[in-house]
Image: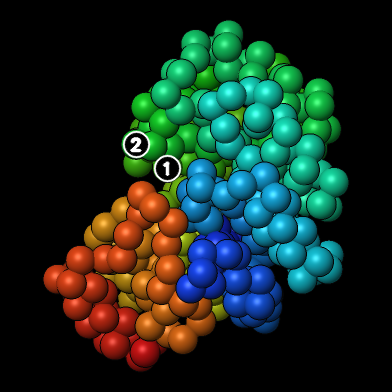
Amino acid sequence: MKKITGALTAVVTPFETDGNVDVKALKKLVQFQIKNGIAGIVPCGSTGEAATLTLEEYRLVVETVVKEVAGQVYVIAGATHNDTSRAIELSIIAKKAGADGLLHATPYYNKPTLTGLIAHYKAIAANANLPIILYNVPGRTGLNLTSDMTLTLAKEISHVVGIKEASANIVQIMDVIKRAPTDFSILSGDDAFTFSIMALGGHGIISVAANEIPKEIAALTTAALEGDWKKARKIHYEWLDLMHINFIESNPQPVKTALFLMGKIKEVFRLPLVPMQDKSKETLKKVLKGHNLT
């Protein structure tokens, strides 16, 4: 796999009113992303409510995305689990479905040591044999990948080719950028940090906001990669309110609600996620209306 750069979308998983995966809506979402310049699709992450998908649903979502993409952009399948054997199982399913790579957060709840993390990722790499992007999201996992830990994993495991950084620790991210191998991708895991991370030498974003505005997020990363910081900065500030409002409640509640209001999916969540509170929803509506998205 070539070095991963640009904007990749952490795509939501749309559901039918009966709770089943809405395959038709998912296909349309993928086409919406591709037509608007996205470099890759990341199904079955936290934005895709992966924690509540059955194995069969997981297979269905990844296979649907891979078939719809048809080789036009990368498919990096989320395959996180805190049980290494289940993480391997998900990774193998993703590989058989045709995914180009895997996104793996650190095992949540277990909070393994660095030695445990190396063993975890080595086992996944040995069994799935796909490129792995680490996902550092301590707010969800309870474990922060320090820069030393990230670089050790990259050194010890050849399959580890990048990191999605959602720690919001700019000093830590700078250290990874400074010391990482040249072929290692550092991707923002938070839309609001994309401009800053890329200005410091990062390579792109795995984006929530791209579900709503793929063209604009793709344009921001392209401008940054080309060194057009004036254009990148303009896009960043123009859409910063949307980037923030997507986290007014737990992701993906706001972004799925926004997509519903935009007429792209049904307003259906998997418990324990529920519809947004009325006050939050009204605030979201104002932001969307302000950008002519509804």
Tag 1, which secondary structure? loop
Residue in front for this viewpoint, 216 or 142: 142
Looking at the rendered structure, the kind of residue marked 2 is Gly
Residue at left 76%, top 27%? 125
Q: Note whether residue 100 is visible.
A: no
Residue at left 41%, top 73%? 267
Residue in front for this viewpoint, 283 or 114: 283
On the image, which quarter does residue 252 sit in? bottom left
The answer to whether the residues at label 2 and label 1 have Cβ atoms under 8 Å apart is yes
| Residue 9 placement, left or right of 242 | right
| Residue 7 placement, left or right of 142 | right
Q: Note whether residue 48 is visible.
A: yes
Residue found farthest to the front: 18
Sequence-wise, the earlier of marks 2 and 1 is 2
Tag 2, which secondary structure? helix
Residue 224 screen position, x and y as percent: 53, 62
Label 2 Cα neighbours within 10 Å, binned few <14 / some 14-19 / many ≥20: few
Looking at the rendered structure, the kind of residue marked 1 is Ala
Residue position for label 2: 139
Residue 184 screen position, x and y as percent: 66, 37
| Residue 57 placement, left or right of 258 | right
**Numbered tag placed on residue 166 in the rendering:** 1
Quadrant (top left/top right/bottom left/bottom right) for the C terminus: bottom left
